[in-house]
Image (cartoon, rainbow, N blue to C red):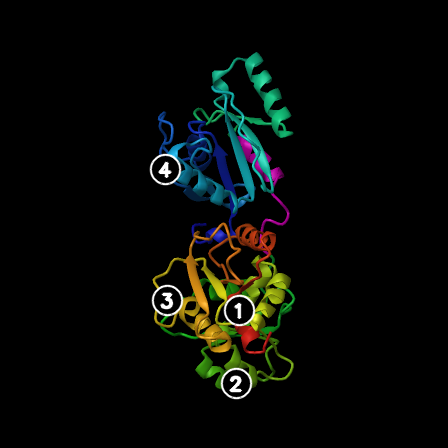
């Protein structure tokens, strides 16, 4: 269960005012003290996450956030973190404190939200009904009444979550449409300085596991061993999936009839908007030495000398568009609210992010009229392989 990446879990985000009992609710759902609980407002200063498996729902990631009513300079920074967590939310639990009765504003852009009245055990029956009616009128939905302290209503809340799981919450299969069950996939995976010692990078792991689950046959090799791997086969592989950086070297060796793709391209189609990414890649043709490009990495690794996002793609762009091309790099959850100063955004494959979070960034770029593509699409376009 703990081996399921966060990006493949249902993201449930708890929001509400300070001291409404969000941390207590997370602990009640998790069945353990995963978050610090205190009567002091503002105890949760950063987003707290807990991975777990909920019966009937499956692998989930719970996120406890700072109060949306936090104040002051530091408080606003905490609120910003909470708002960012909402961008990845598949389901939002809007927690209302029964003691205060204050109703937070509805969450903008949330795919699904469930109003939750916490500390219901502090109210008599008549007061509880009045508050429930007010919450329903405010949010347009019947609230779930709970007490995180004694566990009242937790079972009913989980049933409500199960009933409200969005149909599109999980990303489409990486290899959907590329191979059929029983067909052979040949994976070309460089083992350079960026390849983690003793293990494969996440996109490679996910692709192999998915192909096995789908009943496909899998053969793996390095770029150097590709000719020998192809020669050892009686029939051409149905598809060759390669690291984006070696697409140019793989293409001439590809047997007739074998389809060609990259791990990053599969991620672009599964988690992002592949049509927008392909359309946006054409912007590369109009970039020049005065242009500005933003490269966004999902992970926060220490850059290596062969880093694809910080070294290789900028070098490709400058060789094509001019040495003066400005390239900015952000990593992790750092992503500018204002993208208007950029001519193009190039995102990594985002294996560390869930689909909803990636699409929130795509929508942000679209709203601001900024083209956005990803690593794999960019490399394929530059090498005339798209």
**Foreground label between 4 and 1:** 4
From the image, state whether disc 4 or disc 2 is nearer to you: 4
Question: What label sits on residue 376 in the rendered view?
Answer: 1
Q: Are marks 4 and 2 in contact (CB under 8 Å)?
A: no
Q: Nearer the viewer, residue 334 or 359?
A: 334
Tell which circle, 4 or 1, labels the residue nearer the N-terminal end.
4
Residue 158 vs 330, above or below: the answer is above
Q: Earlier in the sequence, mark 4 or mark 2?
A: 4
Regarding mark 1 in the picture, which secondary structure is present there? helix
Tell us which disc is closer to us: 3 or 4: 4
What is the total number of numbered labels drawn onto the structure image?
A: 4
Q: Quadrant of the C terminus?
A: bottom right
Q: Position of residue 274 (x, y in %)?
A: 61, 63
Q: Which residue is mark 4?
A: 74
Whether residue 156 is visible: no
Residue 112 location (% of width, % of height): 60, 40
Mark before the other along the chain sequence, 3 or 4: 4
Residue 232 circle label: 2
Q: Residue at x 38, y 40 (%)?
A: 46
Quote the CA–CA distance across marks 1 and 3: 20 Å
Q: Depth check: 318 or 110 in front?
A: 318
Q: Nearer the viewer, residue 262 or 328?
A: 328
Up/down of 2 relative to 140, above or below: below
Q: Earlier in the sequence, mark 1 or mark 3?
A: 3
């Amino acid at each position: 269960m703990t081996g399921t990446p966060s990006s493949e879990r249902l993201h449930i985000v708890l929001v509400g005012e300070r001291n409404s009992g969000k941390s207590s609710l997370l602990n009640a759902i998790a069945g353990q003290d995963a978050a610090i609980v205190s009567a002091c407002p503002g105890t949760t200063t950063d987003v707290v996450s807990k991975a777990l498996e909920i019966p009937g729902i499956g692998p989930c990631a719970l996120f406890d956030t700072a109060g949306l009513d936090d104040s002051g300079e530091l408080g606003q920074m905490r609120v910003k973190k909470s708002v960012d967590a909402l961008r990845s939310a598949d389901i939002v639990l809007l927690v209302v404190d029964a003691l205060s009765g204050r109703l937070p504003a509805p969450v903008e852009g949330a795919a699904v939200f469930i109003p939750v009245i916490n500390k219901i055990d502090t109210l008599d029956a008549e007061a509880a009904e009045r508050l429930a009616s007010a919450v329903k009128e405010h949010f347009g939905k019947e609230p779930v009444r709970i007490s995180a302290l004694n566990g009242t209503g937790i079972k009913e809340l989980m049933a409500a979550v199960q009933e409200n799981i969005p149909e599109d919450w999980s990303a489409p299969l990486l290899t959907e449409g590329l191979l059929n069950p029983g067909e052979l996939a040949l994976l070309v995976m460089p083992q350079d300085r960026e390849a983690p010692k003793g293990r494969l990078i996440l996109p490679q792991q996910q692709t192999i596991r998915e192909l096995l689950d789908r009943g496909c046959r899998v053969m793996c090799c390095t770029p150097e061993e590709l000719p020998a791997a192809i020669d050892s086969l009686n029939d051409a592989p149905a598809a060759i999936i390669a690291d984006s950086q070696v697409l140019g070297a793989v293409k001439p060796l590809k047997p007739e009839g074998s389809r060609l793709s990259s791990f990053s391209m599969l991620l672009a189609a599964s988690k992002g908007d592949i049509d927008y990414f392909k359309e946006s890649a054409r912007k590369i043709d109009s970039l020049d030495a005065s242009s500005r490009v933003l490269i966004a990495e999902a992970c926060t690794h220490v850059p290596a000398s062969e880093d694809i996002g910080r070294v290789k793609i900028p070098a490709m762009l400058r060789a094509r568009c001019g040495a003066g091309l400005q390239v900015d790099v952000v990593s992790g959850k750092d992503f500018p609210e204002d993208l208007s100063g950029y001519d193009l955004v190039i995102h990594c494959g985002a294996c560390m992010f869930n689909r909803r979070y990636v699409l929130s960034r795509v929508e942000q770029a679209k709203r601001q009229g900024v083209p956005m593509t990803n690593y794999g699409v960019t490399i394929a376009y530059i090498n005339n392989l798209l």
